[in-house]
Image (tube, rainbow, N blue to C red):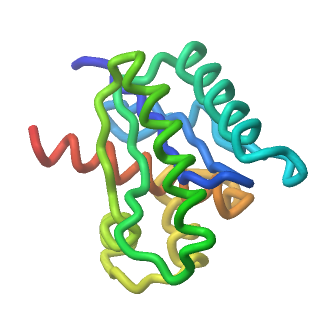
Amino acid sequence: MKIIVILGIDPGTATTGFSILRQERDGFVVLDFGIISTDKNSSAGERLKKLYCEVGKLLKKFQPNILAVEKLYFFKNLKTALPVSEARGVVLLATAQKKVKVIELTPLEVKMGICGYGRADKKQVQKMVQQILGLEKIPKPDDAADALAIAICGALKIKSCG
């Protein structure tokens, strides 16, 4: 069985959630998770540069085979949608340079994959992530928990596709 390491990303300019999972025969091993934060007083370019560098460090350290990233498919607020799209672009560029396979998932797909219900709330998703990964407590902060959910669903999508 080929070792699969998944980088899960919940993109954002201020805060990007990340997770690194290794898929094993009987489940997942959590290698790392957390957030990449940028200084709100920095320029947009500087914030994206920091995100690019931090994702690069994760790619170098863990050498994932797969990037599972949240896809922005609709937005309520254009002011937040554009920076999230920029952050996604930086993440996609960094992983493309390392030839990492990309799986894009909508929030609905993630909620369906984790909870079996597309309108599950954050607490339901976090509780299921905790159970699936056998964590002692609910993962925090929210962006990191979302990145774990995205990585799990990315791995499940790969598995279902053969």
Residue at (57, 76) in percent of width and height: 122
Eyeballing the image, is 28 above or below 72? above
Task: List x then y, in percent, for residue 36.
Answer: 72, 42
Residue at (44, 30) in percent of width and height: 93
Which residue of the protein is positioned furthest toward the right in this rendering?
41
Name the foreground residue: 97 vs 160: 97
Q: Going by the image, does 100 lie left or right of 150? A: left
Task: List x then y, in percent, for residue 119.
Answer: 40, 86
Residue at (54, 75) in percent of width and height: 78
In what quadrant of the picture does the N terminus appear? Answer: top left
Task: List x then y, in percent, for residue 5.
Answer: 41, 27
Task: List x then y, in percent, for residue 35.
Answer: 71, 46
Name the foreground residue: 15 vs 153: 15
Q: Quadrant of residue 14?
A: bottom right
Q: Going by the image, does 71 lie left or right of 58? A: left
Task: Determine if residue 130 is in view.
Answer: no
